[in-house]
Image: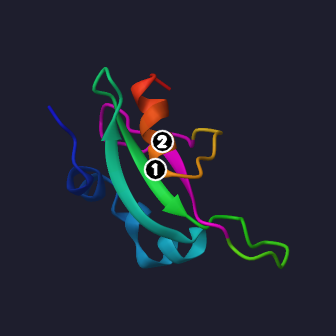
Amino acid sequence: MTITLHDVNVANPGWFSSENIRFFGDINYRILHDKQGKPYLVRKTYAWTGMFGDDPIAHYRINPIGANLDILPLDDRTFATLAEVKTALRDCV
C-alpha cells in the first residue's frame, strides 16, 4: 500500500498545524518511499538556519513514517536539494 501525505496528515494533525509550520519554518511536505517501499515525510524547511541573525536557508529533512502512520524521529542528515533526498532514498537510507 502506498502511503500519501493525506494519510499522514489525518493521523498527525498537530504536526501540520499552522503553529507548528510557523515554529519550524516548514515550507512544504511530501511523502517519498525508499526502494523497499518504506515511507518518509520529506520536509522543505528553514528550520533553525536563521537562529543567529543569519539569512534562513531552505533545505530538506526527512522523518521515517511508522507502521501506524506516526512520524518517527528526524534523520540527522540535511539535504540541499530534493534530488539529494531522492538519491538517498533510492540508495536506501
Disc 1 + disc 2, Cβ < 8 Å: yes
In the rendered view, tell whether residue 34 sits above or below residue 6: above
Q: Is residue 58 magenta?
A: yes
The residue carrying mark 1 is 82
Residue beneath the point at 40% across and 47% down: 41
The tag on residue 85 is 2
Q: Nearer the viewer, residue 43 or 69?
A: 43
71 drawn magenta: yes
- Mark 2 is on which residue type? Val
**Residue 18 x, y percent position in the rendering:** 43, 78
Q: Residue at x 24, y 58 (%)?
A: 10
| 22 versus 2 height, above or below | below
Return the residue found at the far right: 52
Residue at x-position 33% and y-position 28% = 38
Q: Quadrant of residue 91?
A: top left
Quadrant of residue 13 within the rendered picture: bottom left
Q: Is residue 63 visible?
A: no
Task: Provide residue 25's location: percent of width, then percent of height.
Answer: 57, 71
- Crowdedness near tag 2: few (<14), some (14–19) or many (≥20) residues, C-alpha within 10 Å: many
Q: Give me the disc on residue 63.
A: none
The residue type indicated by label 1 comes to Leu
Would you say the magenta stretch is mainly helix, strand or loop?
loop
Task: Identify whether 58 is placed above or below 32.
Answer: below
Q: Nearer the viewer, residue 15 or 42?
A: 42
The magenta-colored residue range is: 57-74
x, y (%) of residue 44? 49, 60
Provide residue 72's location: percent of width, then percent of height: 48, 40
